[in-house]
């Protein structure tokens, strides 16, 4: 027979309402009671029925994740991180791919929230960086946490989890500079993503701090896609004096750049160093493997969801900050003389 909340209450020697408060992480329950209930849940292998909870009352038990990102690895890691936090608290996950450029995006978002009874949303770029989206959610009075590109310094928005892309970009550019590279190409991602701007700022600041001139011709607009890396790498390699290194805004772009270089017989890293950003599977599936900047998406997604769940429980929130760190592999080496 399926274990019910009343079975847990009987095992723990408390009321089923107390069990419900423990499951929902309400702060009013005494620690020793929480321990007894959690022990009973574990002993009976109880799993809350989220559908029944949604039907039984006005409180919603679903976390929404909307996205517009062509990188499947990013989306999957986000889903896994959110699910880790949801499973521990009995929430369900509602996933909705959405076109961020749609003129009806705010209306679609409103309809989804009202129809699906979403308790709160985890927002990733470009939605998390859209003032119009934030304004819509505030008007709907729905809880949300935004994952945004920025240092978070001087800010204390409890609805934000900051990714310091600028610091990560600075560090990987400094790595290339330490290897003797002075002409370093920069392959941009999509302009609507603030991460592209932040990573470019980190690149430029590292050059400036090491007395290396920023050459606009070495900075190419692009997209977070493999083909963008291929095309822009070909453009840089066709220059009269091509760069000795390339910094791609993500690993997918970097993988495309590496592919283009190998097609032209350019040895990596003997003739050209290539680095990426994110430490996605793309960085480990190339040959040679890519030096990159480690951005732990699963961890980031989990912590953003935990931040949202605290907000739903009425607990005091605080912003969080991640600083991605370089992950050095075989695609970067000393500048060719």
Image (cartoon, helix red, strand yellow):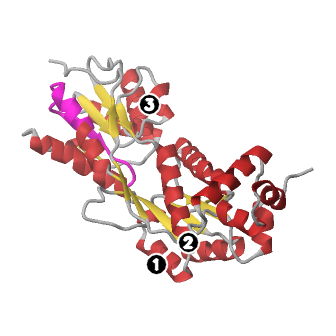
The image quadrant that residue 260 belongs to is: top left
Rendering coords of residue 176 (x, y %): 22, 30
Q: Is residue 264 above or below residue 117?
A: above
Rendering coords of residue 307 (x, y %): 49, 60
Q: Earlier in the sequence, mark 1 or mark 2?
A: 2
Q: Which residue lies under the disc numbered 3?
A: 283
Q: Is residue 188 magenta?
A: yes
> Which disc number belongs to residue 105?
2
Observer able to see residue 213: no
Q: Which residue lies under the disc numbered 1?
A: 135
Q: Secondary structure at mark 3?
A: helix
Q: Is residue 43 above or below residue 181?
A: below
Marks 1 and 3 sit apart, C-alpha to C-alpha, by: 37 Å
State which region is magenta.
172-191
- Residue at 27% across, 36% down: 172
Q: Earlier in the sequence, mark 1 or mark 3?
A: 1
- Residue at 23% across, 51% down: 201
Marks 1 and 2 sit apart, C-alpha to C-alpha, by: 13 Å
Q: Residues within 10 Å of mark 1 (few under 14, many from 20)?
A: few
Q: Residues within 10 Å of mark 3 (few under 14, many from 20)?
A: many
Foreground tag (3 vs 2): 3
Q: Secondary structure at mark 2?
A: helix
Observer able to see residue 305: yes
């Amino acid at each position: 027979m399926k274990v019910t909340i009343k079975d847990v209450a009987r095992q723990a020697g408390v009321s089923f309402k107390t069990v419900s408060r423990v499951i929902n992480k309400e702060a009013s329950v005494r620690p020793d009671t929480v321990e007894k209930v959690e022990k009973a849940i574990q002993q009976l292998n109880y799993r809350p029925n989220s559908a029944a909870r949604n039907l039984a009352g006005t409180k919603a038990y679903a976390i929404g994740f909307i996205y517009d990102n062509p990188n499947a690895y990013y989306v999957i890691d986000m889903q896994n991180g959110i699910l880790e936090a949801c499973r521990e608290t009995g929430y369900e996950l509602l996933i909705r791919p959405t076109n961020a450029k749609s003129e009806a995006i705010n209306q679609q978002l409103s309809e989804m929230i009202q129809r699906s009874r979403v308790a709160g949303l985890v927002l990733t770029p470009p939605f998390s960086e859209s003032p119009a989206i934030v304004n819509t959610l505030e008007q709907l009075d729905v809880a949300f946490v935004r994952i945004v590109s920025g240092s978070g310094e001087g800010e204390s928005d409890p609805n934000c989890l900051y990714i310091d892309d600028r610091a990560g970009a600075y560090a990987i550019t400094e790595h290339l500079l330490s290897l003797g590279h002075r002409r370093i190409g920069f392959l941009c991602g999509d302009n609507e993503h603030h991460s592209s701007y932040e990573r470019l700022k980190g690149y430029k600041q590292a050059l400036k701090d090491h007395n290396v001139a920023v050459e606009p011709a070495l900075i190419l607009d692009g997209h977070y896609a493999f083909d963008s890396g291929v095309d822009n790498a070909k453009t840089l390699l066709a220059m009269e004096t091509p760069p000795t290194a390339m910094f791609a805004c993500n690993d997918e772009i970097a993988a495309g750049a590496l592919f283009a270089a190998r097609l032209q017989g350019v040895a990596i890293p003997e003739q050209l160093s290539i680095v990426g950003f994110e430490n996605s599977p793309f960085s480990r599936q190339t040959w040679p493997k890519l030096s990159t900047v480690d951005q732990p998406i699963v961890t980031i997604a989990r912590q953003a969801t935990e931040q949202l769940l605290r907000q739903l429980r009425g607990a005091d929130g605080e912003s969080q900050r991640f600083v991605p760190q370089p992950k050095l592999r075989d695609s970067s080496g000393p500048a060719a003389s």
